Image (cartoon, grey):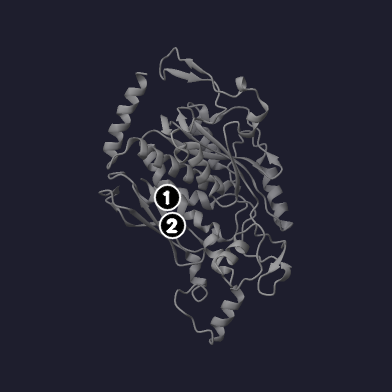
Amino acid sequence: MLRFLTAGESHGPELNIIIDGIPANLEILAEDINQDLSRRQAGYGRGGRMKIEKDQVIFSAGVRHGKTMGGAPVALRIINKDHEKWLDVMSSKPVDINDETIRKSLEDKYISKVRPGHADFAGAIKYQSKDVRDILERSSARETTSRVAVGAVCKKFLREFGVEIFSHVLQIGKYTIEHQNKWWLDAASYQASKALVESSELRIYDPSNKYEKDIKDYIDQTRKAGDTLGGLLEVFALGLPIGLGSHVQWDRRLDGLIAQSLMSVHTVKSVAFGAGTGVAALPGSQVQDQIYVNPENDPRYIRHENKLGGIEGGMSNGMPVVCTVAVKPIPTLIAKLDSIDLDTRDEAKSHFERSDICVVPAAGVVLEAMLAMTLATAFLEKFGGDSIEETKANYNSYLSYCKGR
């Protein structure tokens, strides 16, 4: 069973991650993780925090000489550089409130005015927190840094089996990026197309450079208006075998597991597979992905459509797993919203803390991480193995079986 836990606050000293269940002898270096941490911090519309933090992972357990060791949990640390300015406010020890400097620091960072759309209101009431900062610090999207680190390890594991996970932006606010072809399915041009997305600050596939400038200007205008923007992303996995997940119990269905993991990401409000809501308007003959014998016999069977997004009956069917994910505009607005003050119980304007304007490009990196974690878990459930060598042997045996069906 692959599982992970994270700990740490937005302005605390560090983020801590433990990953349990990664097979032994998987080659993993800090650079494998730092690359995705850097991708998460990029993107047009990010805020000032990204200029402060230069996230780098530190292995503190479970890795020796560049390989996971003996099935041990992998422990990771990521230092929060901004913590240096929050030593008193985020101190784990009691502080002297009679000290005028400390008292002023605490008063400046005290929060009672909640932000609609954030965890502030429900969290403060649920956990009986007087200072909403007790909720804000953990519920902050800073926590997604830890998820990206976990996802990078899972991606490295999945690449051992030829599985590729990637994402790109489909829409930011009122701008929708039109695609003439499904470039991610073209093996011949996939890497070049992927590089094009990665070179874009918006993480869009825009070979004609039709959208980049207009969307950036749109984000700048939104910033001046004190507002924020959401959007749509596509996250997908290529190279998956048939049979991950299961139909036999509700909590083993792969689409349900993926939906839960993607929905757990901050700002995500909907997840759709394949054609998504579009299936509601079509007859069954235009929705089911019909199956044909492949004259080249590798693979033996092929499909010409993928409206179901690579999953049937809760199991992967050999087609790419494709999800469309909607993320809302983040709830921390420069132009404050109507809200309440939990101390006075009166109407008030919402609290503002340094934030982003548009996190859509960065959200794709987090979604990739959660998809990778879910698929790696399903992989290990299906193929097992205490070492990467054993998992590969089981996987190759299964592929040989599949070719004979």
Outermost top residue: 295
Q: Is residue 249 above or below residue 50?
A: above
Q: In the orientation shown, which residue stands out farthest toward the bottom?
A: 98
Question: Can you give x and y, in whole percent of width and height, for residue 187 in the image?
Answer: 48, 27
Q: Quadrant of the C terminus?
A: top left
Helix, strand or loop status at disc 2: strand
Task: Provide residue 199's location: percent of width, then percent of height.
Answer: 55, 42
Identify the residue shown where x is 69% and y is 61%: 334
Q: Work out whether 93 lies above or below 29.
A: below
Q: Quadrant of residue 386?
A: top left
- Mark drawn on residue 150: 1
Nearest the camera: 252 or 279?
252
Amino acid type for the residue under numbered disc 1: Val
Q: CA distance from mark 1 to mark 2?
A: 9 Å
Q: Tell which circle, 1 or 2, labels the residue nearer the N-terminal end.
A: 2
- Which residue is more in the foreground, 154 or 94? 94
Residue under the image location 37 percent in, 46 percent down: 2
Query: Looking at the picture, how far across and down is residue 309, in whole percent?
Result: 54, 31
Q: Position of residue 360 (x, y in %)?
A: 60, 47
Q: SS for tag 1?
A: helix
In this rendering, would 378 be left or right of 228?
A: left
Q: In this orientation, which residue lies closer to the viewer: 345 or 385? A: 345
Report the amino acid beneath label 2: Thr
Identify residue for label 2: 6
Above/below status of 27 relative to 74? above
User: In which quadrant is the N terminus drawn?
Assistant: top left
Extreme front residue here?
249
Confirm whether residue 354 shows in the render: no
Closer to the camera: disc 1 or disc 2?
Answer: 2
Label 2 near label 1: C-beta < 8 Å?
A: yes
Q: Is residue 405 left or right of residue 171?
A: left
